[in-house]
Image: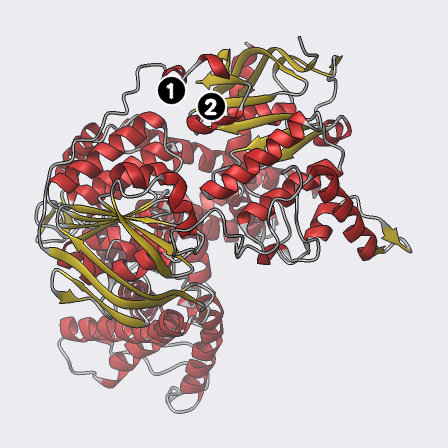
Amino acid sequence: MQEKIIEFKNVSKRFPGVLANAHITMDIRKGEIFAVVGENGAGKSTLMKTMYGLHAPTEGEVFLHGKKVEKFSPSYAIENGIGMVHQHFMLVPSFTVAENIVLGNEKRKHRFFVNEPEATSVVNDLCKTYGLAVDPDLKIEDVSVGIQQRVEILKTLYRGADILILDEPTAVLTPQETDDLFKVIRKLVNELGKTVIIITHKLNEVLALSDRVGVMRQGKLIGVVETASVDEQQLAEMMVGREVLFDKLDKKETSGDTLIKARDIMALDKRGFKALKGIDLDIRAGEILGIAGIEGNGQTELIEVLSGMSPLVGGAIEMRGKNIDGLTPHEIREIGVAHIPEDRLVTGLSKESSIEDNMLMGLQHNDQFSTKGIHINRKKVGDYANGLIEKYDVRTAGKAVKVGSLSGGNMQKVVIAREFSFNTPILLISQPTRGVDIGAIEFIHEQIIQKRNEGCAIILVSAELDEIFRLSDRIITLYEGEITGEFKSGEISKKDIGYYMTGKRDKEHGTNDKKETNSTELKGGE
Amino acid sequence: MERVKMKENMDYLMSLGTAIFAALLIGAMIMLFYGLNPFVGYQALLVGAFGSKYSIATTVAKMVPLILTGLATAISFRSGIFNIGGEGQLYLGAFAAAYIGFTFTNLPVFVAILLAVLASAVIGGLYALIPAILKVYYQVDEVITTIMLNSVAILFTNYLVNYPFAADQGKMGGTNMIDAAYKFPKLVRLSKLNTSIFYTALIALFIYYLLQKTSFGYNFKMVGENSVFSRYAGISNKLYMIGAMVISGGLCGIAGAFEVYGTHYRFLQNISPGFFFDGMLVALIVRNNPVGIVFMSLFFAVLKTGSTSMEVATGIPSEMVLVIQSIIILFIAGEQGFMEKYRRFKLERKEVA
């Protein structure tokens, strides 16, 4: 039996109105990879924040290296060898890798100046020790997300962490980068004796990586199990608290006219750089076209030009035979397009408004809801909203509740309910299940497939490869604004598609070492 | 109305009540500090505002510009475009109305008044159109342009009344009188209360209906709350922002016309002592709610009317009222923060118990 490095004894954390953690008793052993899984809002992050000293528990005790923690503060945690890599990286984009790593603990020249050469050599030493390759002189804004994460890990190691907490570390990574990360984690644990705690909701990763799993649900620790003794199904059930059937979705054979036809389309991103460099698309009725790609490779812009939110700078798009160049989002919607945007809070909802008002959007001038398009008939709108709340299973105290106070999954259901109820033949769907619970994901997927079976032409952008693979009839990979591959459902595996997502076009992958990522290869250890 | 919404409104009314009470309390403390009796002071204030038929009429009369400029603020702020230029729009509107009144002296009364009110609304609206277009098409900050355009309008009308349109008799910074037949009849002798209060009530009803009950009001609100969302969902942000600004300017213009036709019967170079800014405060306090604006206008009017009598009767300077107003604003600005603290406090107490 290994030594217990962290022990929770009956730890509870109460926020006003919610019990985020309820009587949690568990221990983490030295030199293991411990996974914490649970749905959004299950209390994973709260527990980890307690561990990292970001807040104190309301009751209960935490022991670190067998010693009771008296003072909960991040500095205490860091002094005692706990390091945390947050889901959203805490890096300064305009600083170099080395500067970011030493930031806060940098060696000074004449008290005021950072000793740059020393920082670089310190970082080089770190890389050697831990077998993590990064170029210390590159700026953070110029390196990939995978490397940024590596920098975050190095930062914690630089500060002497023995226990690393990784919060949703694979959310932003490609399959390859995920594999690389796992190698790093295994090396840290197996060869260097570190302890790693990983918070995630991706069960396949838990199974692939961890030694033990703690499953959380509604603030409670449902159980801690040896990973080897469970399968994905069992974990999912523990997480959700009921049987989860990832049924094969019932896809009807359909084929219809081409509803979206795009030729050589080009678009600019927010900074004015070319984000789409000439893309052709054809999407037929009754078909889901999945767009796979690492975030920031043109998916956002693709949906924006299709929906009219940003202008086309080259090429042409026809929807149902109509050229949409220069049309406003309103005019494109008139053609028969609905749009589930990637960021519901920025684009898809008004959080200050009620559920009812958010569901009315787009129909406020419709005769069905307003007399002569002017006088809103609140009774009818209310009935309509109640109907949608029921149909789409929005969990809320009522239609007058402000959307901003709903959970992410329920907000998403409001967006989906509204957009799907327009009954348009074309659907633009972006990140439909981002931040949504497993139960709701299943529901949303069913709704999307139902739309497909009804004969909608659907374009689906998602950062979750599982989702793309599950739903799409056809998959296109985007890399730096260009299409690098196109596959029918079943033609390619999740593993192989990553190579196309990182810019390779040939099928001869794996052996060539021409990876374009800048000096990012995982050296050491192999 | 659902319970959720009711509760929200009740919560806000509670906060507002608390803020007003606290402001009055602080006002009382200041009076005590200067050795004055706050009970006597506040009593004098109330008597000044409600003590006689005349004082009630004066109080109600003061509501007219407050309500109109308050509604003007509400419609623009709700739509996410901030018209701070109501004062200038009011001056121009007042001048336009006065011009109609002293130039076309032989029209039927009804036609003349309609024409004057329309002219004031159109001029006020057009003047607001300038910053609206600059904002919508050229991303020029409307807060800055509208503030600056205030001075332009006030100084321009100053010039007009002192030179080209100066009154024939006596140089007193005013135009000629409007035709006597056009004057709004007084409702209470010697007071300033006149029929404009009825027109104001009609306008308030209309704006209330527009904002709360129609699809246009819904669109204004959505554009103001999240303009990315409204564009995504097919609302023309440009149209609604410009529309809100023009309506706002029009309302301020009408407020100016009512000052001319109901109170002064001519345009004066200092016709408004900052009515718009008071109206803006009124709207801010009640979060641009049209019904709230009417009630808060009454409260402000009471303070205004009462403060003068308070000064005369007790020697407490009428500026005390400004202090009270400011404190209310301060509390309301911090309302969300205070309420959050309070809710936490309550919850924690409950959990301990």
Residue B65 x %, y %: 36, 60
Q: Secondary structure at mark 2?
A: helix
The chain to which mark 2 is attached is A
Q: Which mark is residue A236?
A: 1
Question: Residue B186, image x and y in percent?
Answer: 27, 61
Mark 1 nearby-residue class (10 Å; few <14, some 14–19, many ≥20): many
**Quadrant the N terminus of chain B occupies:** top left
* Label 2 or label 1, whichever comes before in sequence order: 2
Determine which quarter of the picture holds residue A259. Answer: bottom left
Foreground pick, A426 / A349: A426
Instruction: Please report the residue visible at 37 percent of the width from the left and 43 percent of the height from the top.
Output: A352
- In the rendered view, would you say A269 is above or below A27? below
Q: Residue at x 22, y 28 (%)?
A: A248
Few, some or many residues within 10 Å of mark 2 (<14, 14–19, 20+): many
Residue at (65% x, 26% y) in the render: A189
Between marks 2 and 1, how big is the CA–CA gap?
12 Å
Residue A207 image label: 2
**Looking at numbered disc 2 in the image, what kind of residue is underneath it?**
Leu
Between label 2 and label 1, give the one nearer the viewer.
Answer: 2
User: Looking at the picture, how far across and down is residue A8, in whole percent?
Assistant: 63, 13
Judged left or right of residue A444, residue B329 is: right
* Nearest to the observer: residue A415 or residue A235: A235
Q: Which quadrant is the C terminus of chain B positioned in?
A: top right
Q: Amino acid at mark 1?
A: Ala
The one nearer the camera, A87 or B337, is A87
Q: Residue at x 27, y 71 (%)?
A: A315
Q: Is residue A82 above or below residue B120?
A: above
Above/below status of A439 relative to B215: above
- What is the quadrant of residue A525 in the picture? top right
Q: Are marks 2 and 1 in contact (CB under 8 Å)?
A: no
